């Protein structure tokens, strides 16, 4: 399933750790926004690892993009919408 993961982390060191973690699973679309094509087990891994990175004042949001919504991505302004070589939608 395609997930949109965003965060609001004020500390530079923690923010760098979060970015490094998420880059291992997906693509950075904005400064603190990532698109990740994940199995449920991978999402759980990210959530567990992120708990070791963040503090109570930080925030990480996970948005599932299901079915046709995962294919409906548009961009205005600079940059392009990232499209993977293949996108498989599997209902787990």
Image (tube, rainbow, N blue to C red):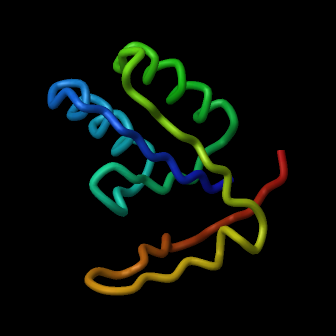
Q: How many marks?
A: 0
Q: Is residue 9 above or below residue 74?
A: above
Q: Is residue 26 above or below residue 87?
A: above
Q: Position of residue 78 (x, y in %)?
A: 26, 83
User: Quarter of the image holding residue 2?
Assistant: bottom right
Task: Determine the residue positioned at 83% across, 44% down.
Answer: 92
Q: Is residue 87 above or below residue 55?
A: below
| Residue ranking furthest to the front | 57
Residue 49 appears left or right of 44: left
Q: Position of residue 85 (x, y in %)?
A: 50, 73
User: Quarter of the image holding residue 12?
Assistant: top left
Residue 25 appears left or right of 87: left
User: Which one is in front, 69 or 91?
Assistant: 69
User: Which one is in front, 45 or 8?
Assistant: 8
Q: Position of residue 81 (x, y in %)?
A: 42, 78
Task: Determine the residue positioned at 78% across, 67% down.
Answer: 67
Q: Is residue 73 above or below residue 5?
A: below
User: Quarter of the image holding residue 52?
Assistant: top left
Task: Determine the residue positioned at 27% across, 54% down.
Answer: 31
| Residue ranking furthest to the left | 12
| Residue ranking furthest to the bottom | 77
User: Which one is in front, 29 or 45?
Assistant: 29
Q: Position of residue 8 (x, y in %)?
A: 36, 38
């Amino acid at each position: 399933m395609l997930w949109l993961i965003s965060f609001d982390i004020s500390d530079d060191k923690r923010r760098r750790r979060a970015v490094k973690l998420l880059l291992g699973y997906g693509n950075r679309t904005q400064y603190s926004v990532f698109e990740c094509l994940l199995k449920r087990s991978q999402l759980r891994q990210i959530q567990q690892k992120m708990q070791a990175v963040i503090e109570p004042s930080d925030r990480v949001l996970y948005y599932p993009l299901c079915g046709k919504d995962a294919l409906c991505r548009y961009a205005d302004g600079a940059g392009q919408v990232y499209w993977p070589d293949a996108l498989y939608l599997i209902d787990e």
